[in-house]
């Protein structure tokens, strides 16, 4: 029985691409405002209906600059430091909203706008997300087709909102004034435990401030003099953080962190895992050809075959190298890898190989005593 058909609503008319840039053309001293507050935070203020009335800018301590503002035209006047103002904006826009409003059987532009949420329609282009269409009907929950960078994704409305909430939190975290950097190795174990239970936000909170200072510290004489044990812990920390960024679909950040770990840890036991994670991030980004060399390097450096081989099999399959893909799948299963995704990939590769699949299996399957010559 075929699945019920889905209807599609083109979001071209509803999309808000370029709204912020157009606003900038209409506001005097707009660029100066963006330089002080931050371009995305100026956008956040408009989305949150915040009216900035004045700024007392302190060039010696920019984060302490005072901002007078109000929520809406009739809101109570408030004054916060720039740092506190950014935190307040992030809290307002990152707060959980009510569930999306239900769609009528035949939705119009207003009902679609309310279903997605006005603020999210405005926030999407700020983070480079392009809304393409709304898919609904067929006894399934509505989904959005989006362009995220160079890839096209289909997500629930809640999933789309979660992406924006995470992006807002990351922007607030990046804007915080830097504190004196210190290394607390206890955080590495805490972050590993957080990843193990799927709390990747906690890992980012624990270790997200490490890469920038570490990249400079490891180039100093003191950093170069670190023992293998301390260096190994730092490289392990970067691997844990890179994994969290991959799970949060922040692939650019993941690659930066993992490349830093590889740069300073190629001779260490954890380097195979870092190459495997970097290869996995390329697979997640659809860059399968680039991932192959990284994944092979991961295996050569002792990376976990249960994690690396399924990714390598996927890369070979996408590139049409189905015999190599099937060999990787067999090795992955022999190493103990099991998943529905792995089984589905095996069926795809077997179908692509056709009759050659049987001949391939006959060649690679171990012979019993009766099959020896």
Image (spheres, rainbow, N blue to C red):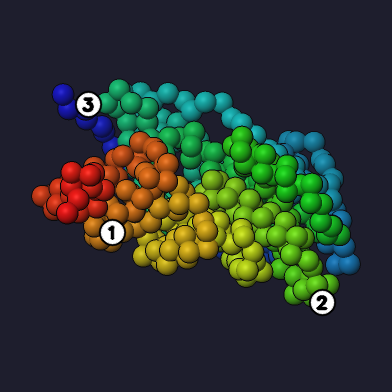
Q: Badge 1 local density, few (<14 within 10 Å), some, or many (20+)?
A: some
Q: Residue furthest bottom?
A: 221
**Can see residue 125?**
no
Query: In percent of the image, x 79 and y 46: which residue is there?
Result: 186
- Asked which secondary structure carries label 3, the reply is loop
Q: Nearer the viewer, mark 1 or mark 3?
A: 1
Task: Judge from the rendering whether residue 114 lies leftward or rightward of residue 76; answer left or right.
Answer: left
Q: Would you name the residue on which mark 1 appears?
A: 324
Q: Would you name the residue on which mark 3 appears?
A: 4
**Can see residue 337?**
yes
**For this rendering, which residue is in front, 106 or 72?**
106
Quadrant in which the C terminus appears: bottom left
Spatial CA distance of label 2 from label 3 is 65 Å
- Asked which secondary structure carries label 1, the reply is helix
Query: In percent of the image, x 41 and y 30: which residue is there?
Result: 111
Q: Earlier in the sequence, mark 2 or mark 3?
A: 3
Query: In percent of the image, x 45 and y 47: which residue is there?
Result: 306
Whether the residues at callouts 2 and 3 have beta carbons within 8 Å, the answer is: no
Spatial CA distance of label 1 from label 2 is 45 Å
Q: Nearer the viewer, mark 1 or mark 2?
A: 1
Q: Is residue 262 above or below residue 203?
A: below
Q: Residue 328: x and y, percent?
A: 34, 53
Task: Judge from the rendering whether residue 324 lies leftward or rightward of residue 227; answer left or right.
Answer: left
**For this rendering, which residue is in front, 200 or 67?**
200
Image quadrant where residue 211 sits: bottom right
Spatial CA distance of label 1 from label 3 is 37 Å
Q: Nearer the viewer, mark 2 or mark 3?
A: 2
Q: Badge 2 local density, few (<14 within 10 Å), some, or many (20+)?
A: few
Image quadrant where residue 102 sits: top left
Q: Would you name the residue on which mark 2 appears?
A: 221
């Amino acid at each position: 029985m075929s699945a019920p058909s889905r209807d599609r609503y083109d979001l071209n008319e509803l999309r808000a691409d370029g709204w912020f840039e157009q606003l900038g053309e209409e506001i005097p001293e707009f660029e100066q405002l963006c330089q002080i507050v931050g371009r995305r935070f100026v956008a956040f203020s408009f989305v949150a209906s915040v009216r900035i009335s004045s700024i007392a800018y302190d060039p010696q301590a920019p984060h302490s600059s005072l901002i007078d503002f109000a929520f809406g035209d009739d809101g109570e006047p408030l004054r916060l430091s720039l740092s506190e103002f950014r935190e307040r904006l992030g809290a307002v826009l990152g707060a959980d909203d009510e569930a999306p409003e239900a769609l009528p059987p035949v939705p119009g532009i207003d009902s679609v706008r309310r279903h997605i949420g006005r603020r999210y329609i405005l926030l999407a282009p700020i983070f480079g997300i392009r809304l393409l269409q709304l898919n609904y009907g067929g006894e399934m929950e509505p989904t959005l087709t989006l362009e995220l960078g160079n890839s096209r994704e289909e997500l629930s409305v809640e999933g789309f909102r979660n992406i924006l909430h995470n992006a807002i939190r990351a922007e607030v975290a990046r804007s915080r004034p830097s504190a004196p950097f210190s290394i607390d190795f206890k955080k590495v174990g805490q972050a590993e435990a957080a990843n193990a239970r799927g709390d990747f936000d906690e890992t980012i909170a624990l270790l997200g401030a490490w890469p920038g200072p570490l990249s400079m510290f490891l180039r100093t004489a003191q950093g170069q003099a670190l023992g293998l044990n301390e260096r190994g812990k730092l490289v392990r920390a970067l691997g844990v953080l890179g994994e969290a960024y991959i799970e949060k679909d922040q692939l650019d950040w993941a690659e930066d962190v993992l490349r830093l770990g590889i740069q300073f840890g190629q001779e260490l036991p954890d380097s195979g895992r870092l190459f495997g994670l970097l290869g996995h991030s390329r697979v997640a980004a659809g860059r399968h050809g680039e991932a192959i060399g990284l994944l092979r390097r991961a295996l050569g450096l002792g990376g976990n075959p249960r994690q690396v081989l399924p990714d390598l099999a996927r890369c070979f399959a996408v590139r049409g190298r189905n015999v190599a893909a099937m060999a990787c799948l067999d090795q992955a299963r022999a190493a103990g890898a099991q998943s529905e995704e792995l089984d589905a990939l095996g069926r795809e590769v077997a179908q692509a190989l056709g009759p050659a699949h049987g001949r391939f299996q006959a060649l690679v399957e171990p012979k019993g005593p009766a099959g020896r010559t």
